[in-house]
Image (cartoon, coloured by chain):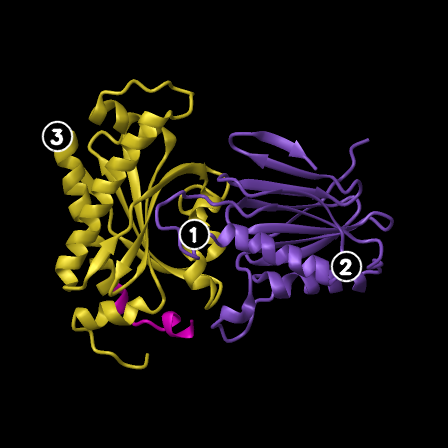
Amino acid sequence: MEVFKHFKEFKMDVLKEVGNIGAGNAATALSRLLDKPVDMAVPKVQLLPFEEIADRVGGAERIVIAIFLRVEGDAPGNLFFILSPEAAKSLLKRLAGMQVDQDGMFDEMEQSALCEIGNILAGSYLSSLADFTKLDLSPTVPGLAMDMAGAVLSYGLLQFGQMGDDALLIDTTFLEGDHEVEGKFFLIPDPDSFAKIFQALGVPLEND
Amino acid sequence: MIEEQSIVKVGMADMNVVRDPGVIRTLGLGSCVGITLHDPLLKIAGMAHIMLPSSDIAREGQLNIAKYADTAVPALLERLVAMGASPSRIVAKMAGGSQMFLMAGTGDTMRIGPRNVESCKMMLSNLHIPLIAEDTGGSHGRTIELDSGSGILSVRSVQMGIKEL
């Protein structure tokens, strides 16, 4: 674990670029789907205590829509695409022409549509990452959950859990032009995957 | 008169204890298990937010004993006993252990919730602590709160509201 605390600035920048490329492609995909410009914030890469990860989306009890997929292959990890219920409704309305009940929960059809949208976006995140790193990265079939952020995100922390109480998170936010749809990608590579990502990108391996 | 009730928070992979009239709480349990121990006579309560079933897989230098079922349950019992609780009076309740994402190819990682529950139960039975109530499994998140005075465990979830155990 210690090793992650001492990543040099440069390595953090490399990971930011990883987030940038992945989310940038996903944002482009979303922008095509919506036929509207989609902006992206500069990725945040940080080693965060488990408690603070849920704070990034409004706290452990905040209800979120999360599409989760496990990345398999050379550099395994966990990828989340996270939306607020309002943003999800807006997405469904615009992409699928579905009129979603303002306060109701999502029915099976809506959940399936959301899962598919998440799948497209996460897929483009991952495939651009695979192209960029030349690593073999393949996504599992995504799962969808609508629940408390703490409950949902803890799934992505199990691999880090064996090593300590913090996880290294690549967090990218994107916003649709008129800010009705805001989404977040959380990429949490498994602890052992960082060396592979760095190696694939030609970052020298040193003991720092 | 307004009674001041202190709320003790337990984070992920964390544990704590509280005395009457305190309340102890943990937020957003998914596959994690929230286990509580309570001495009804002395009104002392403890809670652990357990993340993984066994410390055998730990690769961390300094083990966080609150994180693993096999280390957290005995450690929590010890903390209560150190406060004067009698092991023969202590009862347990627990909640959590969900499978948040129902996905194809459910390997061991996806089944982590049920495995956490199994492991907690095994530890309780090894320590001869009766499990008097549980709300485990399913595919939803839970926030739990134990009242050290009454021993009532409230379990709150998005879909199902509040349930008292």
In terms of secondary structure, what is the magenta stretch mainly?
A: helix
Query: Which quadrant of the rendered structure holds the C terminus of chain B?
Result: top right
Task: Provide residue B138's location: percent of width, then percent of height.
Answer: 52, 40
Task: Provide residue B83's location: percent of width, then percent of height.
Answer: 81, 60
Which is more toward the observer, A63 or B140?
Answer: B140
The alpha-carbon separation of the residues under discs 2 and 3 comes to 63 Å
Q: Amino acid at mark 1?
A: Met
* Chain coloured purple here: B
Residue A47: image quadrant is: bottom left
Q: Nearer the viewer, mark 2 or mark 3?
A: 2
Residue at image position (80%, 53%) is: B90
Residue B29 in sight: yes
Q: Amino acid at mark 2?
A: His
* Chain coloured yellow here: A
Give the magenta-colored segment's residue range: A1-13
Report the residue that reaches farthest toward the right.
Answer: B41
Residue at image position (76%, 45%) is: B148
* Tag 1 residue: B110
Task: Provide residue A146's location: percent of width, then percent of height.
Answer: 42, 36
Horizontal arrangement in the rendering, residue B96 relative to residue B74 (left or right): left
What chain is tagged by disc 3? A
For residue B128, the mark is: 2
Which is more toward the observer, A22 or B38?
Answer: B38
Residue at image position (43%, 48%) is: A153
Position of residue B65 relative to residue A96, above or below, is below
* Tag 3 residue: A35
Which is more toward the observer, B128 or A111?
Answer: B128
Of callouts 1 and 2, the N-terminal one: 1
